[in-house]
Image (cartoon, rainbow, N blue to C red):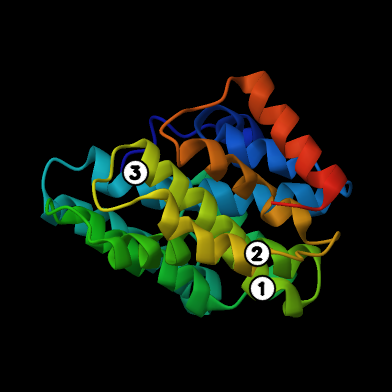
Amino acid sequence: MDEDATPPADDLDALVARVDPDRWLSSRLIADAQDRADVIVLYAYDHELARAPKVASNALLGEIRLAWWREVLDEAYGAGPVRRHPTAVALAEVIARRSLPRALLETMIDARYRQLDPEPLEAAEAVLLARETAGAAARLAALILAEAGEGDRAEAAGALWALGRLRLAGEPSLSPEHMAPLRAQAKGLGVAAFPAGAHGVLARVYGRGREPSPVGKRWRITLAALTGRI
């Protein structure tokens, strides 16, 4: 697996700020530095998984990249030393520190296999993909930030954001109506867990096929935090 595009472990925050500015902005709402750093690792992990369908020249190579990350989980959960990849090392540390459930991290891997298929997503598939990628990351972030009872709402908020991104990318099966159930489920996300899903507010704009400016994103996420509404 290549590591050319991956920065040193202490620069994962800068990586996420560059490749995933929406969730990086949400992470700025986390006051505790260790909590914030651990959540950033989840987003770096999700970024690495998302790259597999994008950078592989064929489905087999994509499967190899995803299998590589499954082996990272094997190592992180006790099968042996973790390979020297900055995100892998950082993820193993967060797993140990937070006792993160392996099932959710594996779900994030499994979901990316669907994106190796060139066929367009059906609407139901897109919703499931959103839940099992960014939604699962948000659920894990909520476990770090708050009690487990916030998981469903955090997952819905994270999935809402991912669905908006798919809509912005031109996924033909999606319409703004597909986002309404997720928005309803995300309602009431608590203060402590709110940074895990604050970026979901951007789906309102993405659903209309537009992307806010960086200032606009910051303003919307800040307003969501102030009002407690996604």
Residue 151: numbered disc: 1
Q: CA distance from mark 1 to mark 2?
A: 10 Å
Q: Camera-side residue: 157 or 87?
A: 157
Residue drawn at point x = 61 percent, y = 50 percent: 41
Marks 1 & 2, CB-CB < 8 Å contact: no
Q: Is residue 40 visible?
A: yes
Rounded to the nearest whole Å, what is the CA distance between mark 2 and mark 3? 27 Å
Numbered disc in front, either 3 or 1: 1
Query: Residue 27 location, x and y as percent?
Result: 72, 44
| Side of 13 relative to 61 (left or right) | right
205 or 13: which is nearer to us?
205
17 relative to 71 in the view: left or right: right
Q: Is residue 159 above or below residue 19?
A: below
Give percent across and percent down for residue 2.
32, 39
Of labels 2 and 3, earlier in sequence is 3
Can you name the residue that lies furthest to the front here?
177
- Label 2 neighbourhood size at 10 Å, few (<14), some (14-19), many (20+)? many
Query: What residue sits right under mark 3 in the picture?
Result: 51
Crowding around mark 1 (Cα neighbors within 10 Å: few <14, some 14 to 19, many 20+) is: many
Quarter of the view holding residue 57: top left
Point 63% across, 32% down: residue: 11
- For the point 61% across and 58% down, which residue is it? 157
User: Residue beneath label 2, please?
Assistant: 186
Q: Quadrant of residue 4?
A: top left
Q: Name the kind of residue labelled 1 in the image.
A: Gly
Query: Residue 225, located in which quarter of the rendered image?
Result: top right
Q: Amino acid at mark 2?
A: Ala
Instruction: Judge whether 8 appears above or below 27 on screen.
Output: above
Task: Using the rendered image of the protein, determine whether residue 67 is visible from the camera's viewpoint.
Answer: no
- Asked which secondary structure carries label 1, the reply is helix
Q: Amino acid at mark 3?
A: Arg
The spot of residue 43 in percent (x, y) is: 56, 49
